[in-house]
Image (cartoon, helix red, strand yellow):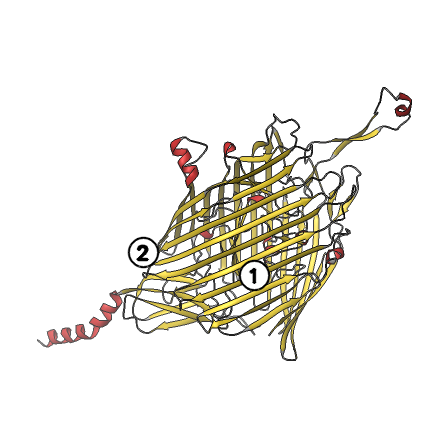
């Protein structure tokens, strides 16, 4: 009896703990910056004492299902923030909603103690770089911490000039890059002939750049995805900040509408004077641009938010024109939307948006020789819904759709004066489904299907050129805690194209037009394999191999002379290569390096050639050092092989004869003509540049200030921009240039 009594007493004491350990709950909410209430994208949430955890999405929200209800402790970490642990004392219901506030890391630390565990990213992050304001600060650019300039330094990304916001990714054309700002499509990024982009760093919360193998939630482009999320505004304190810069000055005002629950932000940027470009180009091209952004956000205390925003950007580069002059250019983006993100039902996360985007680009010849009027206009109302269901402790099901109703208008004139002019309305209904399997802590698999419902219907009924769906698959396997392998496969289609000639030396903007229904979409297939080594949380090394099969491409017929000739020509191509990257990052210094090797080919009308962006070798090294508490010194060195161009084989003369005036014409010299060689069979010399920047933080009259000085092409290397095929003149890229800016905050 005594033994039995002891057992009963022991069961009575332990049974609450046993029951508590057996009870599983859901923990959801948001990771928040303690200083301003902004959610923190891609923060890692780990259950202490286990390998179980998750990553917040790009909006900063997370869901952890099937976790122990008692003794729960969460460790939260994010780039640029101090790691913090949260002890959850008691969860009485089926779940709990939390706002986990973390503090920004100090600018300097006397030493670094490495603790905790790394959390592997999801399988869908294959070949993807996450960009935060902290990572943007490591970029050396002519204008502050430009997010697009940061992307152009990544492995596999090619530009045709040393400082340009137009880029090509792993063999894809410039028009094959999808750019989204808060899920709104943007068709042109450049300001000032590509010196910087219109996405000012002051309004960027985070960005995700995928060089290939992206999952089914993205579509409509063949090569890459650049997904940018803007800040919501400070819902705790009022703040005014900005930058004085000779090239472009900006101002941002933000603050709470009702403290802790809602916020506003207003932003504006424009150049100080119209001739600012004369510092960089030996051309008399006055330019003017502006950027504006406004946003209102209401917060649901950790379960979501709703926002209304408007984004506008415009450029106007004027020229006096004339027979030997230059054309003028102007383009404009206008975007507006109402969007939201909401956690509900202990396992669902829904994003939704109703949006409208408008884009117009135009070339005005002004009588300049060899130029014609070119015009592209796009208006796109759309609705977007994406639902994530956390079906089990580690798995996620995602369902979504985007219904767009674009209107396209364009006018294009080729070299021979043939005009292609269209205006049409389309319906573009897209839907997708993905499922993420997390098998233990080692294996992550993500499968997906994307449907263009119009093309799916055409394939099923035989009523046109179509396809059933675009399959996507990505996965990663952690061999050890320090070593993982990953890969991705995907099929992609594109229904629009750029009418600009890809062999032009430079295109200031994109002339976007829809692909005619009779030709069918462009298509490509991606294959990616990679290895990631991370011996500690300060160091990472990645090696990726890729192959892109562009099985169907379309181009405008630039040689059309007669009306019976086709307006478009079809072709194909491929690209393959290897990207290596490594970084070591401590608070006081960092170093990042990358090497890319790639080959790109195109075939049109039976001619196989290397396009202008076929860059074989590229090396980039960035480093930073903080010698004192208020000082940062940064450097970037870039070395590339030469880009291809079409050589001149010979010059010859032609006598122009008039049978009615032979004596006059026989006394005239022959007219000089050029015989061009095979397309893009010659190579320009390689490119090299060393860029430096230094910044100093101080206060004046109680106002925090940051002075930044930048030098581009420190050694004044004569990098060739292009060679004039007619005259043989060599035109060089930017010489040594410098810029000074002053950032302030109140």
Question: In the picture, residue 239 is in which quadrant?
Answer: bottom right
How dense is the environment of label 2, judged by Cα within 10 Å: few (below 14), some, or many (20 and up)? Answer: some
Provide the secondary structure element on which disc 2 rests: loop
- Between residue 415 and residue 379, name the one nearer to us: 379
Q: How many marks?
A: 2
Foreground residue among 316 and 723: 316
Question: What whole-number distance in Å separates the C-alpha atoms at marks 2 and 1?
Answer: 40 Å
Quadrant hosting residue 268? bottom right
Mark 2 / mark 1, whichever is N-terminal: 1
| Mark 1 nearby-residue class (10 Å; few <14, some 14–19, many ≥20) | many
| Rendered view: 566 above or below 598 | above
On the rendered structure, is 207 left or right of 72?
Answer: right
Query: Residue 450: x and y, percent?
Result: 42, 44
Q: Nearer the viewer, residue 158 or 264?
A: 264
Q: Is residue 492 left or right of residue 49?
A: right
The residue that disc 2 covers is: 392
Specify whether residue 498 is in view: no
Point out the image quarter for the N terminus: bottom left
Q: Which mark is residue 399?
A: none
**Residue 714's image quarter?**
bottom right
Residue farthest to the top? 659
Let me know if residue 22 appears in the view: yes
- Image position, residue 624 (x, y; %): 63, 64
> Which residue is the site of mark 1?
293
Q: Residue at x 55, y 46 (%)?
A: 378
| Residue 594 coordinates in the image, percent (x, y) | 59, 53
571 w.r.t. 68: above or below: above
């Amino acid at each position: 009896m005594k033994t039995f009594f002891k057992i009963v007493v022991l069961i009575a004491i332990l049974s609450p703990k046993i029951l508590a350990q057996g009870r599983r709950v859901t923990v959801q909410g948001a990771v928040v910056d303690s200083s301003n209430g902004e959610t923190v994208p891609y923060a890692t949430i780990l259950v202490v004492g286990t390998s179980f955890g998750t990553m917040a999405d790009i909006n900063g929200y997370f869901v952890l299902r099937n976790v122990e209800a008692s003794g729960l402790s969460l460790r939260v970490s994010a780039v640029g923030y101090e790691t913090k642990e949260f002890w959850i004392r008691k969860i009485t219901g089926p779940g709990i909603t939390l706002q986990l506030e973390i503090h920004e890391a100090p600018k300097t630390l006397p030493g670094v103690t490495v603790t905790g565990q790394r959390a592997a990213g999801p399988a869908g992050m294959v070949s993807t770089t996450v960009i935060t304001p902290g990572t943007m600060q490591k970029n050396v650019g002519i204008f502050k911490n430009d997010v697009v300039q940061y992307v152009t330094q990544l492995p596999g990304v090619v530009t045709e000039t040393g400082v340009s916001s137009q880029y090509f990714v792993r063999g894809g054309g410039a028009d094959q890059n999808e750019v989204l700002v808060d899920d709104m499509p943007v068709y042109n990024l450049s300001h000032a002939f590509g010196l910087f982009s219109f996405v000012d760093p002051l309004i960027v919360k985070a960005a995700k750049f995928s060089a290939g193998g992206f999952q089914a939630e993205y579509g409509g482009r063949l090569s890459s995805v650049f997904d940018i999320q803007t800040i919501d505004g400070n819902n705790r304190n009022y703040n005014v900040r900005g930058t004085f810069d000779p090239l472009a000055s900006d101002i941002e005002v933000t603050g709470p509408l009702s403290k802790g629950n809602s916020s506003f932000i207003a932003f504006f940027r424009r150049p100080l004077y119209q001739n600012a470009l004369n510092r960089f180009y030996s051309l008399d091209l006055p330019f003017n641009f502006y950027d504006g952004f406004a946003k209102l956000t209401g917060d649901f205390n950790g379960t979501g938010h709703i926002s209304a925003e408007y984004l506008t950007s415009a450029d106007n580069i004027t020229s006096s024109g004339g027979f030997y002059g230059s054309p003028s250019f102007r383009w404009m983006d206008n975007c507006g939307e109402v969007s939201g993100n909401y956690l509900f039902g202990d396992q669902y996360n829904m994003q939704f948006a109703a949006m409208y985007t408008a884009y117009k680009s135009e070339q005005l010849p002004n009588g300049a020789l060899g130029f014609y009027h070119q015009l592209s206009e796009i208006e796109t109302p759309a609705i977007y819904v994406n639902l994530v269901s956390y079906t089990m402790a580690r798995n996620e099901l995602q369902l979504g759709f985007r219904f767009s109703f674009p209107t396209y208008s364009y006018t294009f004139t080729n070299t021979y004066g043939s005009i292609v002019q269209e205006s049409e309305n389309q319906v573009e209904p897209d839907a997708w489904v993905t499922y993420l399997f997390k098998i233990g802590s080692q294996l992550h698999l993500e499968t997906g299907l994307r449907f263009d419902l119009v093309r799916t219907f055409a394939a099923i009924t035989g009523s046109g050129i179509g396809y059933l769906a675009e399959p996507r698959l990505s996965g990663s396997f952690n061999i050890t805690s320090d070593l993982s392998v990953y890969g991705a496969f995907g099929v992609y289609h594109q229904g629009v194209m750029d009418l600009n000639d890809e062999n032009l030396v430079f295109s200031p903007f994109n002339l976007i037009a829809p692909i005619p229904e009779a030709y069918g979409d462009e298509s490509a297939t991606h294959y990616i394999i990679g290895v990631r080594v991370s011996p500690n949380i300060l160091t990472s090394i990645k090696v990726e191999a890729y192959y892109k099969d562009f099985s169907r491409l379309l181009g405008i017929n630039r040689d059309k002379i007669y009306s019976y000739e086709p307006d478009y020509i079809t072709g194909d191509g491929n690209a393959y290569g290897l990207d290596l990257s490594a970084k070591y990052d401590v608070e006081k210094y960092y170093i990042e390096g990358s090497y890319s090797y790639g080959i790109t080919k195109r075939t049109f009308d039976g001619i196989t050639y290397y396009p202008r962006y076929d860059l074989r070798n590229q090396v980039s090294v960035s480093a930073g050092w903080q010698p004192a508490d208020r000082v940062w010194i940064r450097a970037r060195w870039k070395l590339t092989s030469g880009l291809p161009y079409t050589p001149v084989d010979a010059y010859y003369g032609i006598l122009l004869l008039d049978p009615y005036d032979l004596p006059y014409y026989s006394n005239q010299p022959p007219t000089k003509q050029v015989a061009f060689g095979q397309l893009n069979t010659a190579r320009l010399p390689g490119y090299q540049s060393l860029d430096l920047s230094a910044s100093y933080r101080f206060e004046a009259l109680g106002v925090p200030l940051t002075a930044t000085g930048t030098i581009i092409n420190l050694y004044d290397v004569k990098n060739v921009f292009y060679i004039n095929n007619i005259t043989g003149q060599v035109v060089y890229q930017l010489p040594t240039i410098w810029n000074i800016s002053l950032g302030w905050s109140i």
